[in-house]
Amino acid sequence: MSIFCGIDVGSLTAQAVLVADDERLVGWRSMRVRPNPIDSAREVTDSLLEAHGLERGGLGSTVATGYGRQQIVEQGLADGNLSEISCHGAGAQRVLPGVRTIIDIGGQDAKVIRVNDRGEIVDFVMNDKCASGTGRFLEVMSRTLGVELSRLGELALGARETIELSSRCSIFCETEVLHGLQRGADRAGLAAGITRAIGERAAALARRLGVEEEITMTGGVAKNAGVRAEIERLLALRLADCPVDPQIVGALGAAVLARRGAR
Amino acid sequence: MITLGCDVGSLFTKAVLLCDGELAASAIIETTGTIAAELPGFIEDLLARGQVARGQVEAIAATGRGGSLAGEADFVEEEMACVGVAVRHLMREVDRVVEIGGQSISAMLLDPDGDLLDFVRNDKCASGSGRFLEVMSDALGIPIGELDEHAARASRDTPLSSQCGVFVESEVITHLNAGEDPADIAAGLCDAVARIIVSQAKRLSEQAPYTLTGGVARIQGVVRRVQRRLSGEYRAFPKDPALAAALGAALLAAE
């Protein structure tokens, strides 16, 4: 039996995933990125391979995606590289065979991807020009609010009312949240305003492309229950739960495509 | 005739005292959350500096994002209209103006009377605004007032590729951590702002003579890079460019 590896270096975290011949998930690792994507790729794969008693040379093949994916190949850490969009599509379809639309919100971009029944890309839209609507927005806002990023979603869901942010720009929103805190505004209400803002960006992106169900969410922001609830409310539909950690879907897709490429 | 113009901007509040069309005195303070309460004292100080009694002032006009907070004003005028009037009053030959405010950037095309023929304005996003530079100077650890002297001794403009302030901030921090000379990053920031100004200005005209107003136009590193990138003749605003809107308000108050 051969093992195939996928590596996804994001702006905030890096993931490595192993799959078997039958595309079954064997194991995965996630870590905070290093300044250099090659170091991130090497560390996260080494740690994963070691945990499974494997060596790089013993792998069937490896595909890299995300930041520095070409250099990762040039450094001999992967055999090939593919776009994040292809990998997220393949990864999501692997764990949710009926999925047709994927909202992927990463650290520095947001994408909506439509796939066919084989996980191939039909169409996509993307925002990588502006932090509003990305994980970076949530990170900046939770810091301003003085709340752990991992707690922001729960806090927002418990709010009695949503204090809406009037700006789109992350920098202006930061000022709004600060002024709100100075006025003594309810922290949970501000958290709800923050998750609504990012939900609105994602819903607008999804409407631009057109949504076909089943729809799911991947990327780190998919872990935020407040954002998920806002997107479900705004698009008036249910997001299918991603059966694996939504942050590893890109790397999983890379591993699956490594397996398919080897066939 | 004595009039007063007060521009309550998002970051700074500016006021000018105008005596028979001449700028007699001016003042600038930071716009805080309590600016409405501070304005009467601010205006009093300006009058004292200009050696003018309150009763001698015939009209007060306010402008800017917080213009309506100036309770003493006889009327409030739109900011771009004020800038247009100020530019036309001082510069007969300039038809194109880019006003870089604390939270906005507006490019304007003026007719011979200083009225707006056309404009494009971005106040949705901090990109290129005074707030943008504040965030960057914080990240860089160089006060805005010192950006120029650092940029002047740069050996190159550090390339900054993003438009979004949050992403540029990350780029600045990454460059600092990588050991890049802060002077080069300061120069790169001037160039980033200049590119945004130029792209706005070009949307209105490719050739018209132009000037720059607003606080950011004080930064020569930005102005020089705009000149390098933008065709059409550049003319420097003959007064402190941060005062343009307040000056225009005072001129309109005199009409």
Image (tube, grey):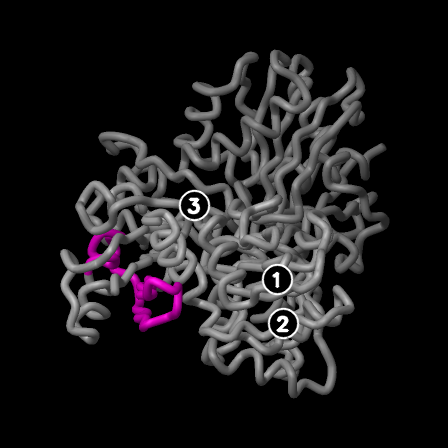
Quarter assignment of residue B191:
top left
Looking at the picture, which amino acid does disc 1 mark? Val
> Image height check: is A170 above or below B120?
below
What is the secondary structure assignment of the residue under circle 2? loop
Disc 1 vs disc 2: Cβ atoms closer than 8 Å?
A: yes
Residue named by callout 1:
A99
Please give the range of residues in magenta.
A14-42
Looking at the picture, which amino acid does disc 3 mark? Ser
Classify residue B133 as left or right of residue B81.
Answer: left
Residue named by callout 2:
A240
Disc 1 vs disc 3: Cβ atoms closer than 8 Å?
A: no
Residue A203 percent location from the top left of the image: 69, 59
The answer for how far apart the CA atoms under marks 1 and 2 are is 8 Å
Foreground disc of the pair 1, 2: 1
Does A35 lie within the magenta span? yes
Residue A136 percent location from the top left of the image: 48, 61
Q: Residue at x 60, y 55 (%)?
A: A117
Of residues B129 and A4, the one nearer the viewer is A4
Q: Chain of mark 3?
A: A
Give the quarter of the figure containing the C terminus of chain B.
Answer: top right
Question: Do tags 2 and 3 sit on the same chain?
Answer: yes
Residue named by callout 3:
A83
Whether residue B143 is visible to the viewer of this picture, yes or no, is: no
Neighbour tally class for label 3: few under 14, some 14-19, many 20 plus, Cα within 10 Å: some
Q: Residue at x 52, y 19 (%)?
A: B230
